[in-house]
Image (cartoon, rainbow, N blue to C red):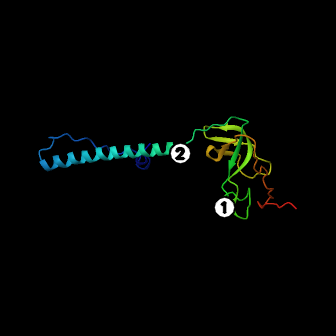
């Protein structure tokens, strides 16, 4: 359904192609021929721009899948998700936290993770926020700070 059809309840009016010689007035004939050429050029430009945007988007797209039970890192936004990790200098905060196992695949681009009990965020994440663990040589912080009922981080003595 097009936006026009959603708004007005019927499909948009079609612009029929004009064939030379249907009008007896020369100016009308030239005007309609020019209109058809402009419409053809607009459609060609639109198709070219759609194709260009798709090629650029596909260059940055990565084809990643995770198996159930596989370990992943979780990318958190330090400025938005301050309930999970509170740092004095948000700019220097870790980007990836984890080693969290994948519990379930929810669709093609969403995965459910097994987070610690104190985590107060949703368990389902988009694939762009996950990073596959390769090797076990360095382990980042895996503990989430404890949070009380008001959402404040509890500092341990």
Q: Which residue is mark 1?
A: 91
Q: Residue at x 39, y 46 (%)?
A: 49
Measured Cα–Cα span from mark 1 to mark 2: 24 Å
Q: Residue at x 22, y 41 (%)?
A: 18
Q: Residue furthest right?
A: 157
Relative vertical location of residue 7 with respect to residue 110 in this rendering, above or below: below
Locate residue 141, reporting x and y percent: 77, 51
Locate residue 92, reporting x and y percent: 69, 60
Q: Earlier in the sequence, mark 1 or mark 2?
A: 2
Q: Residue at x 19, y 49 (%)?
A: 31
Q: Residue furthest front?
A: 137
Pick whichever, 116 or 28, lies toward us: 116
Which dot marks residue 8? none
Q: Which residue is mark 2?
A: 60
Relative vertical location of residue 155 with respect to residue 28 in this rendering, above or below: below
Pick whichever, 3 or 84, lies toward us: 84
Locate residue 20, reporting x and y percent: 17, 41
Q: Residue at x 73, y 61 (%)?
A: 87
Pick whichever, 131 or 67, lies toward us: 131
Question: Crowdedness of circle 1 by 10 Å Cα count: few (<14), some, many (20+)?
Answer: few
* Secondary structure beneath label 1: helix
């Amino acid at each position: 359904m097009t936006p026009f059809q959603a708004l007005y309840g019927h499909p948009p009016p079609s612009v029929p192609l004009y064939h030379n010689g249907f009008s007896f007035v020369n100016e009308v004939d030239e005007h309609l021929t020019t209109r058809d050429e402009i419409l053809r050029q607009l459609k060609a430009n639109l198709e070219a721009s759609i194709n260009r945007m798709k090629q650029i988007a596909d260059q940055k797209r990565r084809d990643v899948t995770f198996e159930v039970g596989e370990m992943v890192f979780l990318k958190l936004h330090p400025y938005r998700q301050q309930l999970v990790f509170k740092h004095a200098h948000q700019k220097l905060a870790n980007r990836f936290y984890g080693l969290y196992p994948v519990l379930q695949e929810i669709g093609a681009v969403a995965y459910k993770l097994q987070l610690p009990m104190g985590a107060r965020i949703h368990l389902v994440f988009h694939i762009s926020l996950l990073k596959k663990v390769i090797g076990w040589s360095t382990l980042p912080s895996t503990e989430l700070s404890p949070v009380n009922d008001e959402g404040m981080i509890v500092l341990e003595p």
